[in-house]
Amino acid sequence: HWGERNIDLDLLLYDDLIYYSEKLVLPHPDMQNRLFVLQPLSEIAADKIHPVYKKSIQNLLKSLTDGDE
């Protein structure tokens, strides 16, 4: 399943698009649970609102680091 690949791109967001298919889900379905995603994203787009959770990236990061999942 997670074997060797030539390239691995994780698309996190595309504007406010919510999209589900067999090959692509937007926004990324687990980004709100990943500190290594939210920390750098908060540096460049802290006020961006997650289209599903309706929370800013900054607030998602705070929830994750505070343990308030």
Image (cartoon, rainbow, N blue to C red):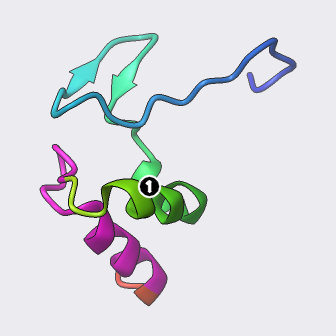
> Is residue 69 visible to us here?
no
Which is nearer the eye, 30 or 17? 17
User: Element type at marker 1?
Assistant: helix
Residue topped by disc 1: 41
Can you say whether 39 is above or below 54 in the image? Answer: below
- Residue 14 figure quarter: top left
At horizontal 46% and vertical 11% (from top left) the residue drawn is: 23
Q: Position of residue 16 (x, y in %)?
A: 16, 34
Q: Residues within 10 Å of mark 1 (few under 14, many from 20)?
A: some
Residues rendered magenta in the picture = 49-65
Which residue extends farthest front? Answer: 44
Q: Position of residue 4 (x, y in %)?
A: 87, 19
At horizontal 35% and vertical 84% (from top left) the residue drawn is: 68
Q: Is residue 29 left or right of residue 4?
A: left
Q: Is residue 51 magenta?
A: yes
Can you say whether 69 is above or below 30 in the image? Answer: below
Q: Is residue 50 magenta?
A: yes
At horizontal 24% and vertical 21% (from top left) the residue drawn is: 19
At horizontal 74% and vertical 22% (from top left) the residue drawn is: 1
Q: Is residue 55 left or right of residue 46?
A: left
Which quadrant holds the C terminus?
Answer: bottom left
Q: Amino acid at mark 1?
A: Leu
- Residue 47 figure quarter: bottom left
Q: Is residue 61 left or right of residue 53?
A: right
Which residue extends farthest bottom? Answer: 66
